[in-house]
Each structure stands twice: as structure tokens, then as C-alpha cells.
Image (cartoon, helix red, strand yellow):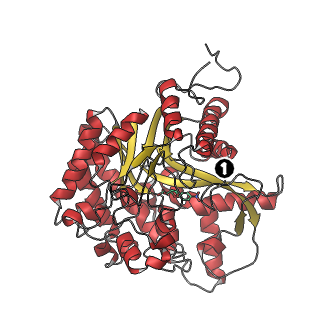
Amino acid sequence: LIAEGQGTPKRFPDDFKFGVATSSYQIEGGWNDDGKSESIWDRYVHENPGRIYNKSNADIACDSYHKSDEDVEMIKTLGVDYYRFSLSWPRILPYGTTDYVNQKGVEYYRNLIKNLKKNNIEPMVTLFHWDLPQTLQDRGGFLNEKIVEWFRDYARLCFQLFGDDVKTWITFNEPKQTCMMGYGLAIFPPRVSGHGILEYKCTYYLLKAHAESWHVYNEEFRQRQKGRISIVVDFSWWEPMVANNTMFIAAAESGIQFMSGIYANAIYLGDWPEIVKQRVNERSRKEGKTVSRLPAFTEEEIARIRGTYDFFGVNFYTSVLAVPNPIPLPSGILNDRGCLSFQSPKWEGAGSIWLKVTPWGLKKLLKYLKETYNNPEIIITENGYSDTGELEDDKRISYIKQHLEVILEAREEFGVNVTAYTAWSLMDNFEWIIGYRDRFGLYHVDFTDPERKRTIKKSALYYRDVIKSRCVDGKCE
Ligand code: PNW
């Protein structure tokens, strides 16, 4: 028996939920099967093979388009409460718009969802995990205000098609990767350089698209389907490199606001974060611009977007150290934020260069989210560790264990309302521009095998034991 409030709490309450995640482009393959059209990622990897590690692509990936029964078996073995996956927009709507629905694509997801439900696994469905239909990119993608309608109509269709079985919806996974990486730094497709203008414009439309979809759900479906819908924002924890120094503390705050708050503030509190408005507006003025590079929300827009959430979805992987950067540099989101980020060489690494093991950062982040966003219900929608694919993955076990521990601590010590944890990922998959090099899976996938044989890793067994015992050690004393 564990006495309440004594020592480190080691047990998850009965209503705490566990899940596991994937995304469509990273696992499905079947890139042009049964009427699916190209996404911007299909187009990108086909036209620029040299930009992906080992020139690989996701034409087949884990072949989940043909193996979803096996996927469900694997998920079932873990004993998770829910499976978070994403819908491929171009598989359902090859032209991007609702004029034509690809029935085969719909059937694929319908079968998957039915199969999950049959096995008592709740589907948690992301509408957009970066694979925009190329046809919509050809019409401007996220720089065309029509994206608000295109996305809203696609969302409505999905609520109609799947909403009787899906009770948790996510509109966008990590807007930062779409707007900053896609339309700012031009690292991900469509690789448009934003120059401190387009990354904000993309964000402005994306937030409106999210809000309109939330309103559609709220007004047309909520009463009957009784589900919930929100967005997922990825947060790194920003730690001042020099503690107790106001300049460094301000740098860390600016970093977290420009990198994550910018996608959360309008939804959870209203409008852009104050620091983002201040800095971009002032810098635009100094650059001699008559209009700010940051689009201004009207009062109506602020009211329309504020409150369009039913929980706070957050992906957490790592932390950075913040350093002020007072040098005035050309416009661009990384210069607008006025700070630089570093990672300490003392922090334990992982397979991915950007991923350092910092569970303490998650603990601080959870407290920060509670205090900043009025104590929302928080669902950790992704958290995971990469290596080179070993089956005896003790480092992944240790990563998950440490992150679960701080979740319990944050609940206990700060009263943070975290209600669910999602491990990324069910299986090794296409890790975007890193190809198949960095492995995040609880299951190993052999990408040289035409059958894409999956093998359970030690971490999967550990996670199964955690879920069964509800204790981070996989057993309770
Ligand atoms: C996630 N960070 O993105 C994505 O949602 C997944 O599709 C991807 O496979 C996974 O991370 C692993 O890369 C992130 O630097 C990438 O904190 C990096 C960060 C956060 C999220």
C-alpha cells in the first residue's frame, strides 16, 4: 500500500491513460495505391532523393497500408488504452477538396478503426501530420487563405465518416514543422523561404483552419458524437544557460514563445504571445516596413480562435539552453526571437542529434504549461527516444521510465493535470529527412525485408508491464 503524499509517487491513477503513436506518411506506404494522390512529401522525396538520408523514401515504409491487422495485433500486445495515428489527406481526398472522395482510402481507415474498437483500443486521430495533398500545394498550400476552407471541409468529412467511432480528434500535429520548417527555414517541403513573413502568414491561416474545424465539430457533431478535439504543439523546454540572470531568463522565455507559444497562445489565451508581437512589430518598423511582418488578428478573429480546444496536446522530446542574441540580424523567425539555443555536451544523447535526454525539462515544462495556460488538461501526445534499432533497447526503457517518473512528480508536486501519455512510436518508421536511420520504435521493422517483418523490442515489454501494473518500474512493491 502506498500512503498518499509520501515519497515519490510511483503509481498511476486508474483513470490515467496510456497510448502509442504513428503517422500516416511515416508508416503507410502504398503511396499511390487505390487512388491515393501525391502528398508534398511524396513529391519532395521523389524529386530530391539526395536530400533524404540514404536516398530512401516512404513509398513502402512499414507497409501499414497492407498490414493494419498486424499493426493492431502489435498494439494489442502492448495493452494500451488508445492508438494515435493520422489520416492521409490525399488518400481520402486525392484532389484535396471534398468534390471527390476516394472510397478505397475511406475503407482503409474504417477497417483500421473497427479493428481497433473490436480490440478495445480507442482511436485518437490526427487529421494532419504534414502530408498535404500536392494538388493543394499547387494552389499555394498554407499561403492561400483558402486553406482554412479546404481544411475545415476535410475535417467535417472525417467527422461525418469516422466520428461515431472516434472520440478524440487532433487537427494539426506540430504547426511549427509545417510553418517554420516548411515556409520559413525551408528544410521540410514545400521548402519555401519565409524571410520572417511567410512563416507567420502560414501560422495565421493554420490557426484559423484549426479554429474553424473546432467550431464545426462543436456546432455540428459534439452533441451527437460526444468527443473532443484539440491541436498538438511541440514544446522543447528552454532553460536559461545562466541561472538567476534576467537577460538569460528573458532569452529562454522568448525562445519558448517564438518556438511554441506562437502556435498555442491564440488558441489557449487569445492573440499572439505579447513578446512575439512586440519584437516582430518593432523589428518590422526598424526595417522600414509600413506593415508588420506579423499579421494582426482582428478582435473578431481573436474571439473566434480563443478557446478552441478540449485539452492541451503536447509533444515533448528534449530541452535546450537559452542565450541572448542581441545582434540585429535579417528578418526570420530565428532572428526575431532574439536568442540562441544550445545543448550541453554533458547531456546524454540519443540516435538523433537534436535529442538529448532531459526528463527534468519535461517536469519544468509541465509546471510552466499549467501556470501559463490556466491549468488545462494536458495529454502528452508524443514522447520517445531514438537509437539505431537494437532489440535490447535499455536506453529507450530508461528514457520512458524517467519521463513517466517526472509526470507523476509534476502531478503530485505541482498539481499538473496530465491525464495521458503517448509513446512515440509503435514501430521504427520513416523519420522524415533522416530516412530510416534514427529508430523510435517499440517494435523493430526490417526495412530490407519485402515483408517488413516486425520484431518486438525489450522496451515494448517494459511499456506493457508499466501499463499492466500502472507503475514505472513495471511492477509495484
Ligand atoms: C516529432 N524537438 O517531431 C514528429 O511529430 C514525428 O513525426 C517524428 O517522427 C518525431 O518527432 C521524431 O523526430 C519533433 O526538437 C521533432 O523537440 C523534434 C522536436 C519535437 C518534435
Give the image location of residue 54, x and y in percent: 49, 71
The reply to whether residue 236 is in sight is yes
Residue at the outermost top position: 1
Relative to 355, does residue 112 appear above or below in the rendering? above
Query: Nearest the camera: 462 or 283?
Result: 462
Residue at the outermost front position: 449
Per the image, label 1 sits on a secondary structure element best described as: loop
240 sits to left or right of 15: right
Which residue lies under the disc numbered 1? Answer: 357
Q: Split into 4 quadrants, where in the image is the C terminus?
A: top right
Give the image location of residue 173, x and y in percent: 44, 56
Relative to 389, does residue 134 appear above or below in the rendering? below
Q: Amino acid at mark 1?
A: Val
Give the image location of residue 196, x and y in percent: 56, 77
Relative to 343, does residue 364 appear above or below in the rendering? above
Q: Residue at x 27, y 59 (%)?
A: 154
Few, some or many C-alpha atoms within 10 Å of disc 1 (few <14, some 14-19, many ≥20)?
many
The reply to whether residue 16 is in sight is no
Query: Nearest the camera: 344 or 28?
Result: 28
241 sits to left or right of 227: right
Give the image location of residue 241, x and y in percent: 79, 58
